[in-house]
Image (cartoon, rainbow, N blue to C red):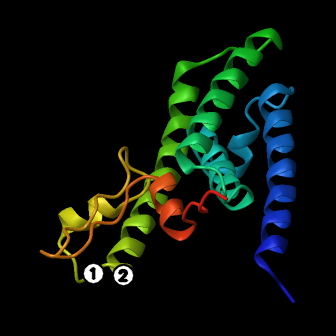
Amino acid sequence: MLTPNHVVIAARAVLALGAATATILMLGPFQGLEAVLGLTDKSAHALAFGALTAVSFAAFPRLRRSDLAQAALILGGAAEIAQMFGGRTASLADWAADAVGIGTVYGASLIESARKMARDHGHLPLSTIIALDRRKAGGPKHQPIAPGAEAMPDRFAERASRHFPRRPAA
């Protein structure tokens, strides 16, 4: 039976193979090979890094997508610098094309996150949905407490002390 772990393992294998292929194509003597596929150099960079970013999102589901996108940008810059040492020319425009591919995939993933939050909390106002987003700084805002109700403790120690009171001294 197919489980999420199988998908992660397969995505990691595809990511390793794709990264190795992209590295060989970018650093090897294959300049102009993208024209055979009907692509320009910039569109090939955008497609390659967009695809690698999308696969990395599936390969590492516990990591933040923003961190994975930043790592892809850094790797794109490192590949451009490495091209200078292999007899090829580095190009800021190629790195910008990498950023376009990465940004497109990252933007699409943010839209999907917003759709999920809208499905889960569609009855709430948008400001409350945004406040509930645990990825934002400061964490979720606490819901107002009804008058006369006991406030929930904010700290772990306070919550734990309610469940596990001190033992009387013997």
Quarter-of-image position of residue 118: bottom left
Report helix, strand or loop for mark 2: helix
Could you tell me how many numbered marks the image carries? Answer: 2
Which mark, by number, is residue 122?
Answer: 1
Circles 2, 1 touching at the beta carbon (< 8 Å): yes
Q: Residue at x 64, y 56 (%)?
A: 57
Quarter-of-image position of residue 76: top right
Q: Residue at x 84, y 73 (%)?
A: 6
Q: Is residue 5 above or below residue 92?
A: below
Image quarter where the N terminus lies is bottom right
Q: Is residue 117 above or below residue 102?
A: below
The residue at the far front in this view is 170
Q: Position of residue 155 (x, y in %)?
A: 44, 52
> Closest to the observer: 146 or 68?
146
Q: Position of residue 144 (x, y in %)?
A: 19, 68
Instruction: Indicate the amino acid at tag 2.
Output: Arg
Q: Position of residue 68 (x, y in %)?
A: 62, 43
Report helix, strand or loop for mark 1: loop
Q: Is residue 74 left or right of residue 22?
A: left
> Closest to the observer: 45 or 102?
102
Q: CA distance from mark 2 to mark 1?
A: 5 Å
| Local crowd size for mark 2, using a 10 Å CA cut-off: few (<14), some (14–19), many (≥20) | few
Instruction: Indicate the amino acid at tag 1.
Output: Gly
The residue at the far left in this view is 147
> Closest to the observer: 167 or 22?
167
Q: Residue at x 42, y 57 (%)?
A: 134
The residue under label 2 is 119
| Local crowd size for mark 1, using a 10 Å CA cut-off: few (<14), some (14–19), many (≥20) | few
> Closest to the observer: 51 or 148?
148
